[in-house]
Structures are given as structure tokens and as C-alpha cells.
């Protein structure tokens, strides 16, 4: 297998990991912001400062944020699917190489001699 294929698999793994970390951070931030907003709204409701229109506006804003994270999640799922395909390709290449060159070294960076 050529080194560029190995690099591609490694790059996909790195991108998937970064995307998952970004999503986790974003979801944590959204959760914190939502919790704080709910506390503020409940305080406002208890004090009689929050109207039905305010609640509807807040709900719309939360739904926009949710849709944004849903899109990010879909992108991550697509990246993970690409990683899965690349990994399967990588495994097939290694299996084929082992059949062609029995006993060849397990290191994929070395080229076996025919």
C-alpha cells in the first residue's frame, strides 16, 4: 500500500476526532447557555417580566441553535462514514498484500520484494 493511502486514513481519523471534539464542545456550550437562559426566563416569569411573546422568541432561537448542531452532527456522521470506508479499503489492501506476499513484514510503510 502506498504511503499516501495510509496518510489519507490517518487524516480522516484526525478530522473525525476533531469534528467530534468540536461537536462535544458546542453541545456543552449550548447546554450551558440553554440552562442559563431557562434560569433567567424562570426568574422573569416568577417576577412577571416575561411575556408569551418572549417565550416564543426564545423557543425559536433555541430551535435555530439545535438545527445548527444537527447539521454539524450530520457532517460528523458523514466524516465517520468516510473514515469507515477508508478503513475497510485499507484492510482490503493489507489482506491483498498479504496474499500476494506471504510472510511480508507487517509494517505497511515498507515495500515487500516480490
Image (spheres, rainbow, N blue to C red):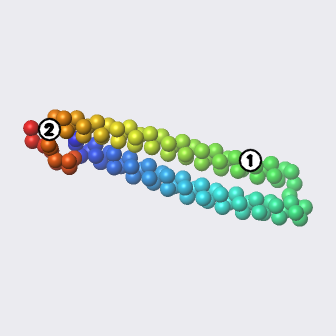
Q: Which mark is residue 30?
A: none
Residue 49 image point, x, y percent: 88, 61
Furthest residue toward front: 103
Could one spot residue 109 in this view of the protein? no
- Whole-angstrom CA distance, mark 1 to mark 2, is 61 Å
Q: Residue at x 22, y 42 (%)?
A: 2
Q: Is residue 27 left or right of residue 14?
A: right
Q: Is residue 54 left or right of residue 16?
A: right
Furthest residue toward left: 114
Residue designated by label 2 = 101
Earlier in the chain: of badge 1 and badge 2, it is: 1
Labels in figure, total: 2
Residue 14 image point, x, y percent: 39, 52
Q: Residue at x 44, y 49 (%)?
A: 16
Of tags 1 and 2, the one toward the viewer is: 2
Q: Is residue 58 above or below residue 87?
A: below
Amino acid at each position: 500500500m502506498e504511503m499516501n493511502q495510509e496518510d489519507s486514513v490517518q487524516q480522516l481519523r484526525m478530522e473525525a476526532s476533531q469534528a467530534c471534539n468540536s461537536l462535544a464542545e458546542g453541545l456543552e456550550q449550548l447546554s450551558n447557555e440553554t440552562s442559563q437562559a431557562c434560569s433567567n426566563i424562570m426568574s422573569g416569569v416568577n417576577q412577571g417580566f416575561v411575556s408569551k411573546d418572549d417565550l416564543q422568541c426564545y423557543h425559536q432561537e433555541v430551535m435555530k441553535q439545535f438545527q445548527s448542531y444537527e447539521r454539524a452532527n450530520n457532517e460528523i456522521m458523514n466524516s465517520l462514514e468516510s473514515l469507515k470506508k477508508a478503513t475497510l479499503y485499507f484492510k482490503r489492501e493489507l489482506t491483498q498484500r498479504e496474499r500476494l506476499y506471504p510472510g511480508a513484514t507487517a509494517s505497511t510503510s515498507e515495500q515487500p520484494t516480490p
